[in-house]
Image: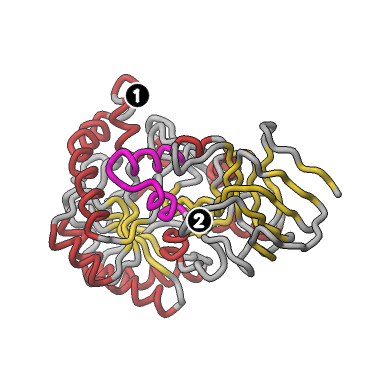
Amino acid sequence: MKTKITNVRLFDGNKVYPEKTTIIFDENRILSIGKGTTIDADVEIDGEGLTCLPGLMDCHVHLSMDGDADPFRDISTDTEADGSFRAIRNAQLQLGSGVVTVRNVGAKYNVDIALRKAIEKGLVEGPRIMASGEPIVMTGGHGHTMAIEADGVDEVRKAARTQLKKGADLLKLMATGGVMTPGVDPNSPQLGEEELRTAVVEATHAGKTTAAHAQGVAGIKNAIRAGITTVEHGIYLDDEAIAMMLEHGTFLVPTLAAPHFIVKYGLQAGIPEHAVRKSEEVKKYHQNSFYKAYKAGVKIAAGTDAGTPFNRHGDFPTELELMVEYGMEVIDAFRAATSVAAQAMKIEGKTGSLSEGKMADLILVEGNPFEKVSDIRNVVQVFKEGKCLVSKPKKLLATSL
C-alpha cells in the first residue's frame, strides 16, 4: 500500500524545506519527495497545518523501568516476567510520543533483547530497539542490581562476549558512579581504561557499538581514550575532555531530563535521599557541560534516561525542550533526535533522515515545532517502515482512494 502526504511542512533530519511538499512511501521505504510527484497512492493525507519529521530516536532508555520514585528498588525484586511486561507497555508509550527507535542501555535478564526479537517477529507492536541487555559493571558498581559484575580485563572480556552471544546490539559499560546507586560517587571512576578498551575491542570485532555511563571527568576521559562510541550523561566535562571528544569523534548523550525530574519532584515524592542530594549537586554542572560541548561542536544525540524517577516513557519532548532551554538551537535539537542519533547508533544508512530509499520512519505533528518546540508534543500519526502504528483524532483526515 502506498501513502501520499501532500501540502506538508518537511524536516528531513537535516533541514526544513522552505516550501510545503509531498512525500510518498510504501510499507517499507520512501518512494518520492517533491511537490510535483505523480506516483499514485492508495491513501492520501492532507498535510495542511502539519509538520512531517523523521521518526524520533531516544538514545538512552530503560524500558523495564517505569519512572517510579525508586526504580532500582523495583528492579531488585523483579522477576523476568515483571520486567518484560513493563518493557512492552513502555515501548508502546514511546511510540505515542513519536519515538520510532530507542536504544535501551540496561535491562535485567536481557528483556530488551527479547522484546526486540518479539517486535521483529511481529508478536507485539513497538519501536525499533537497539538493545544492550545487561550492562557490564565492576563489582558493586553503579547499576549492579541489573548488571553483570566483572573485574579485570579477563572478566570484562568474558562478559562482553557473553552479551554479544545473547544478541546485544551494543555494549553498555559503567565508567563512573552514578546518582541512583547508593554509596557511590558520580565523580568516582569505576571500570578502568583497559577494562573499557577490552569491551570496545570485542564490540568492534562484532561490528557493534558501545556506550559508557560516564559522569565524572576522570571516567569520561577513560571512556574516550578507550574508544567508546557514546558518553552517557557527561556531567563533569572539562575543556580537555571536550577536546578529546572532538578528536575521537565521541558522541555525547546528555540525558538532561534525568536530574531535572529528580530535582523537580524531590524527597516529597519518595525519591531516595541519596538520589535527590546528588542530583541537586550535579544539575548545574550538567547544564554547563552540555552547553560547552554543544558550542564546541561535539556530536550530540538525544536521550532521556526514561525510566529514572518521574522520567516517564512517552515524554521524550521534555528532553528536546531542555536542550533548547539550555542553549541549543531548535533545529540542532531535532537533528540530535533524528540524523545525529542514527549516526550514534550506526543505522544512518537505513533511517534517521527522510530521503528516497530510506525506511519510511516518519511522524506527523500539528503545528510547527521549529517555531515552537513544544509543538512536538502534538503527535498525530506515527509510521514505522511505512506502517501506521499511532493515529490520534486531531485534524488529520486520511482518505482511501
Mark earlier in primary sequence (2, 1):
2
Q: Amino acid at mark 1?
A: Gly
* 140 and 242: which is toward the camera: 242
**The magenta stretch spans which residues?**
317-337
> For mark 2, what is the residue?
110
For the N terminus, the image quarter is: bottom right
Disc 2 vs disc 1: which is toward the camera? 1
Q: How many marks?
A: 2
Verify whether residue 321 appears in magenta.
Answer: yes
Q: Secondary structure at mark 1?
A: loop
Residue 295 part of the magenta segment: no
Q: Which mark is residue 270?
A: 1
- The amino acid sitting under disc 2 is Asn
- The secondary structure that most of the magenta stretch takes on is helix
Task: Judge whether 157 appears above or below 331 on screen.
Answer: below
How is the structure coloured here? secondary structure
- Asked if residue 228 is positioned above or below residue 142 in the image, the reply reads below
Q: Residue at x 30, y 66 (%)?
A: 250
Residue 218 in the image, given as x and y percentages of width and height: 15, 59
Note whether 89 is above or below 289 in the view shown: above
Measured Cα–Cα span from mark 2 to mark 1: 28 Å
Camera-side residue of 279 and 86? 279
In the image, what residue occupies the spot 25% across and 52% down?
234
User: How far across and how far down the image is residue 280, in percent?
Assistant: 21, 33
